[in-house]
Amino acid sequence: MRNFRFLPVVFSSFFSIAIWAQVGINTTEPLATLDVNGNVMIRDTPETTVLPGYKVLVVNQNSFEVGDADPSLFLSGSNSNIAKASASSGVSLLTLDLSLLYPNWYVLKFGNAEINPTLFTSTASDFYYTVPNKGKYFINLNFKMRTLLSLGVATNSQIGLLKTSGTTTTLIDSKPLSVIGLTLSNDSFETIHSVYEFEAGDKVRFVLNRGLLNLDVGVLSNSSGRVLIYKISD
């Protein structure tokens, strides 16, 4: 009878240890069921070509605990820094505030703010994007206008980007308008697309230097354009 009373105690103790055991690798004080203090290698995994039904493993940077996250958190497109504005039936040309000290440049105003319109300030006399967070941003500025100028005529016209930080305004990029020939007229056009570093609160204006083009302030007929801005890194 002693044997029968002894065996349940042994098995009970064994299963108790198995249920509550924590395994540590390179650590004597494991904090989870499996606590690995070192690199982990997985040599073979099945490949998937779709995301639905799967989750992404993530690591807590404070506790180092591994968890899972829905892929939609990364692919939702909820970038609060992205903004887009366009004008398909005429870009407006506004007089630049003289206090910005760029007298030969005019503000390009795009009437249709399509994405995050609150990041744009649009008034009768100004149009600019306010940088919400410090970091590096990609900007794509496109402008096109139909003119009656002949090919080869040097207009010295340019598009550019003006950055205002506090009370200091700087022309951070510019490109001369190119001209391509059409049957009855010519298109003056150019695109600026590059990466720029900004501080939170910086104002970015999209500007035009008329050069020899005879353009009046107001809506530029036969013109179109767009601007796309989004943050790519800190």
Image (tube, grey):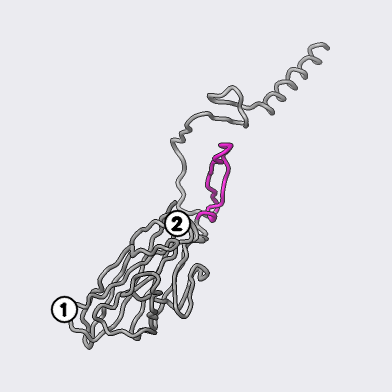
Q: Nearer the viewer, residue 9 or 105?
A: 105
Mark 1 surroundings within 10 Å by alpha-carbon count, few (fewer than 14), some (14 through 19), many (20 or more): few
Hey, what amino acid is under mark 2?
Glu
Q: Is residue 61 magenta?
A: yes
The quadrant of the picture occupied by the N terminus is: top right
Q: In this rendering, is residue 100 above or below 42?
A: below
Label 2: element kind? loop
Name the residue located 46 percent from the left edge and 55 percent from the top edge.
134
Residue at screen point 18% across, 83% down: 150
Can residue 77 be spotted in the picture? no
Give the residue pinned by disc 2: 199
Q: Are marks 2 and 1 in contact (CB under 8 Å)?
A: no
Q: Is residue 192 visible?
A: yes
According to the picture, the residue beneath numbered tag 1 turns out to be: 152
Circle 1: residue type: Gly
Q: Which residues are magenta?
A: 53-74
Q: Residue furthest right?
A: 1
